[in-house]
Image (spheres, rainbow, N blue to C red):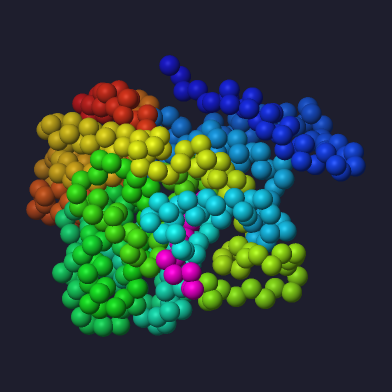
């Protein structure tokens, strides 16, 4: 059956708009006009035509990059807020949406065991990580930032922007931070911050947080957790013990980031930064002479490097978390369970297929596998061919350049290989896995 976009839920938007409109019934008559209906229709249809040239990441046969469709309630709540277009910089620009942001962020903080916290939404993980590392640099000026070689490249870029020294720590053959290498670097001194990644973007690997925390006790660095991708998996009930142990210790880090626009079912862009110690808010300054203030309450613009921010993102997140609370065993948590179950099933079937090499059991929902061949170069070329053939058949995978050590070093030359990669982050992936496996097998034939 052809892929269908949800349009039935649009009927609910009329009811919500009518409820919203009642809140302004006391104002003098003023009919807001959309403009010429025919011209508006033509422009929208032209946009729809252009948007057809896109990957169908709403469909479960899209199993490539970290692209997850927003939940219907998030789309509708975001659209509803657009009739107001709130700005969550100051309360005057977004009084209701600012309160909703604080409540939604507090729910996320409680998911990690934090009642007291400082945090807010951002445009995404990059900006959230920038704020966390900026605070780290303020607290430990001039000291180095360390992250694993499999951490997101944004940490190196951010450190350069902040004029902080950045160094990469080697990863082990499972994509996790090499603890021995980390300690050797710590012994040399000059380290201010270590970034632990819980859900690397390439393989979904989870750094050994309990061991890194033990090193923090000995060496006194600041510990930041990049959970932009994997953070919500703290609610999953089917993690293996090393990953479970790491997520259980997130309450002890100094700061963390999470992206609701990844596993949180939100539209782009919606990231979140959290600090365990609220007193770090003293490092933010807000002395604008023209920004509107009519309240003594804390303005989100006072604890954010960004100024104007979409209140619609907060409305969408708040509404989604009202429908799907962030609690263990709830409907949202079961979605994560299904995503990981799909990845485990996919990996099990790949391990049986002699055409592929798949020794890395997924820690979250990302599966990487190389094509069995005589050389790494031949394997890489074959992966590209399968990738292209699968796309023509309607299966969308991704390619990732990874160390050959991740696959047991089956080749004698070359330390990198282009592997195939699947991100099974849609709950529907579990039910459609047989069809995905069939398409992959046919593409590899």
Q: How many marks?
A: 0
Residue at 34 percent across and 45 percent down: it is 235
In the picture provided, is 150 more to the left or to the right than 112?
A: left
Give the magenta-colored segment's residue range. Answer: 270-280
Q: Relative to the observer, which residue lies in front, 311 or 373? A: 311
Check the picture and name the quadrant holding the N terminus.
Answer: top left
The answer, for residue 262, to whether it is visible in the render is: yes
Residue 98 lies in quadrant? bottom right
Q: Relative to the observer, which residue lies in front, 402 or 4? A: 4
Check the picture and name the quadrant holding the C terminus.
Answer: top left
Was residue 371 drawn as part of the magenta stretch in this picture? no
In the picture provided, is 128 more to the left or to the right than 315?
A: left
Residue 208 place in picture, x, y as percent: 23, 59
Outermost residue toward the right in this view: 28
Residue 253 place in picture, x, y as percent: 34, 65
Residue at 73 percent across and 32 percent down: it is 18
The answer, for residue 386, to whether it is visible in the render is: no
Outermost residue toward the front in this view: 115
Residue at 51 percent across and 36 percent down: it is 323
Residue at 31 percent across and 76 percent down: it is 221
Residue 168 sits above or below residue 186 on the image: above
Residue 193 place in picture, x, y as percent: 34, 73
In the picture provided, is 84 more to the left or to the right than 333?
A: right
Residue 192 place in picture, x, y as percent: 34, 77
Was residue 271 drawn as part of the magenta stretch in this picture? yes
């Amino acid at each position: 059956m052809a892929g269908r976009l949800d349009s039935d839920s649009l009927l609910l938007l009329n009811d919500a708009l009518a409820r919203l409109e009642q809140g302004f019934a006391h104002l003098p008559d003023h009919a807001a006009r959309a403009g010429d209906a025919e011209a508006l229709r033509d422009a929208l249809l032209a946009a729809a035509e252009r948007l057809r040239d896109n990957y169908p990441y709403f469909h479960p046969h899209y199993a490539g990059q970290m692209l997850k469709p927003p939940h219907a309630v998030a789309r509708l709540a975001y659209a509803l807020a657009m009739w107001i277009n709130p700005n969550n910089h100051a309360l005057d620009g977004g009084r209701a949406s600012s309160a909703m942001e604080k409540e939604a962020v507090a729910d996320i903080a409680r998911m990690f065991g934090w009642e007291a916290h400082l945090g807010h939404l951002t445009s995404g993980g990059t900006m959230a990580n920038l704020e966390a590392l900026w605070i780290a640099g303020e607290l430990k000026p001039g000291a180095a930032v360390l992250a694993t070689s499999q951490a997101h490249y944004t940490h190196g870029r951010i450190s350069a922007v902040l004029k902080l020294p950045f160094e990469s720590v080697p990863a082990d053959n499972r994509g996790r931070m090499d603890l021995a290498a980390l300690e050797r670097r710590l012994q040399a001194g000059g380290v201010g911050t270590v970034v632990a990644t819980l859900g690397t973007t390439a393989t979904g690997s989870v750094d050994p947080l309990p061991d890194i925390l033990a090193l923090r006790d000995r060496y006194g660095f600041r510990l930041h957790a990049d959970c932009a991708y994997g953070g919500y998996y703290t609610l999953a009930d089917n993690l293996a013990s090393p990953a479970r142990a790491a997520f259980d210790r997130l309450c002890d880090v100094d700061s963390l980031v999470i992206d609701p626009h990844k596993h949180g079912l939100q539209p782009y862009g919606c990231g979140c930064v959290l600090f365990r110690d609220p007193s770090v808010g003293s490092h933010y300054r807000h002395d604008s002479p023209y920004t509107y203030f009519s309240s003594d309450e804390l303005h989100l613009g006072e604890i954010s490097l960004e100024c104007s921010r979409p209140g619609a993102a907060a409305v969408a997140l708040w509404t989604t978390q009202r429908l799907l609370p962030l609690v263990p065993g709830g409907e949202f948590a079961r979605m994560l369970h299904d995503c990981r179950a799909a990845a485990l099933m996919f990996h099990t079937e790949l391990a049986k297929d002699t055409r592929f090499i798949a020794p890395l059991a997924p820690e979250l929902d990302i599966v990487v596998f190389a094509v069995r061949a005589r050389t790494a170069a031949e394997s890489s070329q074959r992966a590209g061919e399968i990738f292209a053939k699968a796309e023509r058949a309607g299966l969308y995978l991704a390619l990732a350049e990874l160390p050959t050590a991740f696959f047991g070093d089956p080749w004698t030359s070359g330390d990198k290989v282009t592997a195939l990669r699947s991100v099974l982050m849609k709950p529907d992936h579990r039910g459609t896995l047989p069809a995905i496996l069939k398409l992959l097998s046919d593409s590899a034939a």
